[in-house]
Amino acid sequence: MTELPAQPVVHEVNTRVWLRETGRRTGRGTGLSDVPKDIWDEIAPAGVDAVWLMGVWERSPQGRAIALDDQALHAAFTEAVEDVGAQDIAGSPYCVRRYEVDTALGGAAGLAAARAELDRRGIGLLLDYVPNHTAPDSPWVHEHPEYFVRGDGEDARRDPLGFLDTGRTVLARGRDPFFPPWPDVVQLNAFDPALRRASTQVLDAIGRACDGVRCDMAMLMMNDVFARTWGERAGAVPEEEFWSEVLAAVHRRHPRLVFVAEAYWDLEFALQQQGFDFCYDKRLYDRLLNASAESVRAHLRADEAYQRRLVRFLENHDEPRAARALSPGHERAAAVLIATLPGATLWHEGQFTGRRVHLPVFLDRRPDELPDPSLRSFHQRLVSGVHRSGMRTGRWQLLDGATWPDNTSGRDLIAMCWTGPAGRFLTVVNLSGHPAQARVRLPWQELGPDTWTLSNLLDSERYERPGVELLESGLYVDLPPWGTHLWSVTSGA
């Protein structure tokens, strides 16, 4: 097992798409055990601590058939891949039939080979778990109907989109409380004691194959959310939370296994309290894309211990590609920010090279896109530079910038620093499309009368500044639109 660092950098890879493209490059069919070593190096570049192989579990043939007949889905498929065919539609990786590695990917032996390749590089492996629902052809449907939220014949006749008649029983289709039911899955009952024990067993098996687990839509299994969604159909509300019970049991068997929650609705702290190591920071994502620098700053005033257990990202398989959603300058500025914040960091395969097409997870083929060499170089320097610096082993602090009555542009600057055994580091990001100036007050009283060197971690830029100036009036910052500073601050010339 590769033990993940306290604030891991994770690279998400769409496994089927990646293997299909690898096979095209090598000229032969490729499972996880057939990937050449240099291609493993590509998805585990310097600075990455873990690879999330998204979508390795056995997908549902019945779920795929439903997807093939769904006209709305087909429109999304053709928007992403103009000449898409049935052979390109693998079905949803979140419509899991069984937690066994798909034979098309090389089965359990292939996954073991993949883990060994990553482990040799000191890289951890993350896999998916879908707690809320299963495929309609999951063995559990007939073997353990008690695991599911159930209805009756009248429910199936009255609401065929919300309930599935299996021929033996009527099961609710999976859903969250704000959207119509998903047509390709059936709803597990978070309140059922037997389902909780079965979930523990599934996670125990997953935990033997990886170093961390990303739990899909984790907040749907929380007692209050589940009760609001399903009411009396779910039965009595248990005294203990689903995640508190299940994660504690799994951790007794796999104490170092890391759990990541996909989380929304401002429930991140509650899920942390229930045992998750990290939770998605969707609020920061939304603010970085659509809100002001002041709203981002307000978000970052949260307690550092809480922030260290968030997952920062600019895209993932559910969100639009950053290169399409953001201007080039905005994308780079936001990337510098999230790379130097406390917490886990999630990067999506193709993000480093500027892919723009958002691929539905049902597909295992994507269109060819020319990589952006400058964007690739930027991300390589950023991710590896932050890693080599060791800055995130220290203590993080949000800083204030002083502006002037006739120039308040500095309000669009986000300034922060790290202090620890690896040294002193300063990040300043202009989250606006106009120039911004401010004086950033530094917290390092030991600067004193010495001269200090500011060295840019992304290039060879260097400046010298008197410690007295940095302490008394602050570091003068003048950044162009979407400009950034990423400094190592050291004593002497």
Image (cartoon, rainbow, N blue to C red):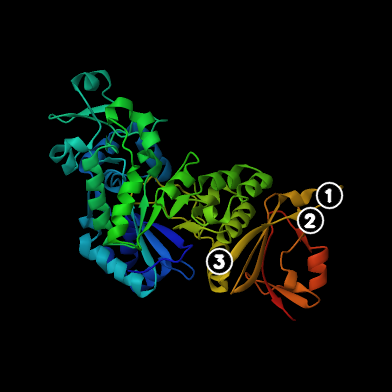
**Which label was assigned to residue 482?**
none
Where residue 435 appears, as percent x and y from the top left, is 76, 53
Outermost residue on the front side: it is: 239
Q: Is residue 160 above or below residue 51?
A: above
Q: Are marks 1 and 2 in contact (CB under 8 Å)?
A: yes
Check disc 1 and report the residue beneath it: 407
**Type of amino acid under label 3:** Arg
Real-space Cα distance between discs 1 and 3?
A: 33 Å
Which residue is painted at 65% across and 44% down in the image? Answer: 295
Of marks 1 and 2, which one's residue comes earlier in the chain? 1
Residue 467 shown left or right of residue 297 in the figure: right
Real-space Cα distance between discs 1 and 2?
A: 8 Å
- Which element carries disc 2, helix, strand or loop? strand
Outermost residue on the right side: it is: 406
Which residue is painted at 33% across and 27% down in the image? Answer: 231
- Which element carries disc 3, helix, strand or loop? helix
Of residue 228 and residue 20, the one placed in the foreground of this image is: 228
Where residue 357 appears, as percent x and y from the top left, is 46, 48
**Which label was assigned to residue 392?**
3
Where residue 389 appears, as percent x and y from the top left, is 57, 72
Q: Quadrant of the C terminus?
A: bottom right
Which residue is painted at 58% across and 52% down in the image? Answer: 303
Q: Residues within 10 Å of mark 1 (few under 14, many from 20)?
A: few
Of marks 3 and 2, which one's residue comes earlier in the chain? 3
**Which label was assigned to residue 437?**
2
Residue 181 shown left or right of residue 292 in the figure: left
Q: Quadrant of the N terminus?
A: bottom left
- Which element carries disc 1, helix, strand or loop? loop
Q: Residues within 10 Å of mark 2 (few under 14, many from 20)?
A: many
**Type of amino acid under label 2:** Gln
Q: Are marks 3 and 2 in contact (CB under 8 Å)?
A: no
